[in-house]
Amino acid sequence: MSERAAPFYCPYCGDEDLRPSEEGGHGSWECASCCRAFSLKFLGLLSPHSSTSGGPSDGNRD
Protein backbone atom coordinates (compact mmCIF):
# COMPACT_ATOMS: atom_id res chain seq x y z
CA MET A 1 0.00 0.00 0.00
CA SER A 2 1.30 3.48 -0.78
CA GLU A 3 1.68 6.42 1.58
CA ARG A 4 -0.91 9.17 1.58
CA ALA A 5 -0.02 12.36 -0.21
CA ALA A 6 1.25 15.22 1.91
CA PRO A 7 1.27 18.93 1.08
CA PHE A 8 4.63 20.30 -0.06
CA TYR A 9 4.10 23.85 1.20
CA CYS A 10 1.78 25.94 3.37
CA PRO A 11 -1.11 27.44 1.36
CA TYR A 12 -0.87 30.64 3.43
CA CYS A 13 2.84 31.52 3.61
CA GLY A 14 4.45 29.07 1.18
CA ASP A 15 6.91 27.67 3.72
CA GLU A 16 7.77 23.95 3.70
CA ASP A 17 7.99 23.42 7.48
CA LEU A 18 4.75 21.41 7.83
CA ARG A 19 3.81 18.83 10.41
CA PRO A 20 0.72 16.65 10.81
CA SER A 21 -1.63 18.14 13.40
CA GLU A 22 -2.52 15.86 16.28
CA GLU A 23 -5.41 18.07 17.41
CA GLY A 24 -7.17 18.46 14.07
CA GLY A 25 -7.48 14.80 13.16
CA HIS A 26 -7.01 13.12 9.79
CA GLY A 27 -5.81 15.45 7.03
CA SER A 28 -4.90 18.31 9.37
CA TRP A 29 -1.54 20.07 9.13
CA GLU A 30 0.32 22.78 11.04
CA CYS A 31 2.81 25.27 9.61
CA ALA A 32 5.65 26.03 12.03
CA SER A 33 6.56 29.17 10.09
CA CYS A 34 3.27 31.12 10.19
CA CYS A 35 1.64 29.15 13.07
CA ARG A 36 -1.49 28.36 11.05
CA ALA A 37 -3.38 25.09 10.96
CA PHE A 38 -5.29 23.82 7.95
CA SER A 39 -6.86 20.62 6.68
CA LEU A 40 -6.92 18.90 3.31
CA LYS A 41 -9.72 16.78 1.96
CA PHE A 42 -9.86 14.74 -1.22
CA LEU A 43 -13.26 15.28 -2.82
CA GLY A 44 -12.99 12.85 -5.73
CA LEU A 45 -12.17 12.68 -9.40
CA LEU A 46 -13.82 14.88 -12.00
CA SER A 47 -15.34 13.40 -15.10
CA PRO A 48 -13.41 14.18 -18.29
CA HIS A 49 -16.25 16.34 -19.68
CA SER A 50 -16.99 18.45 -16.60
CA SER A 51 -15.88 22.07 -16.46
CA THR A 52 -15.41 24.04 -13.25
CA SER A 53 -13.81 27.11 -14.83
CA GLY A 54 -17.06 28.99 -15.50
CA GLY A 55 -15.42 30.41 -18.61
CA PRO A 56 -16.99 31.23 -21.96
CA SER A 57 -17.90 27.59 -22.64
CA ASP A 58 -20.32 27.29 -19.70
CA GLY A 59 -23.31 28.43 -21.75
CA ASN A 60 -24.23 31.41 -19.54
CA ARG A 61 -24.72 34.80 -21.16
CA ASP A 62 -24.83 38.20 -19.49
Image: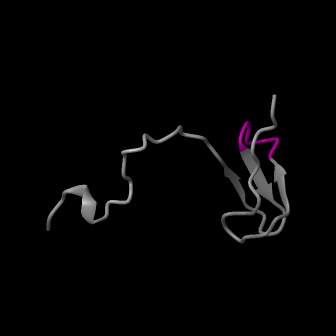
Please say if 53 is above or below 15: above
52 with respect to 35 (left or right) = left
Looking at the figure, which quarter contains the N terminus?
A: top right
43 with respect to 12 (left or right) = left
**Residue displayed at 26% across by 60% down:** 57
48 with respect to 8 (left or right) = left
Please say if 32 is above or below 29: below
Depth check, front residue: 48 or 24? 48
Location of residue 58 in the rendering, given as x and y in whole percent from the top left corner? 25, 57
The residue lying furthest to the front in this view is: 48
Location of residue 30 in the rendering, given as x and y in whole percent from the top left corner? 78, 55
32 with respect to 11 (left or right) = right
**Residue displayed at 65% across by 47% down:** 40
Residue 13 falls in image quadrant: bottom right
**Residue displayed at 46% across by 42% down:** 46
The residue lying furthest to the left in this view is: 62
Location of residue 47 in the rendering, given as x and y in whole percent from the top left corner? 43, 40
Depth check, front residue: 53 or 7? 53
Specify start and end residues of the magenta stretch as a single range: 21-27
Depth check, front residue: 18 or 47? 47
Judged by its main secondary structure, the magenta piece is loop
**Residue displayed at 80% across by 46% down:** 21
Say whether residue 22 is magenta: yes
Please say if 62 is above or below 45: below
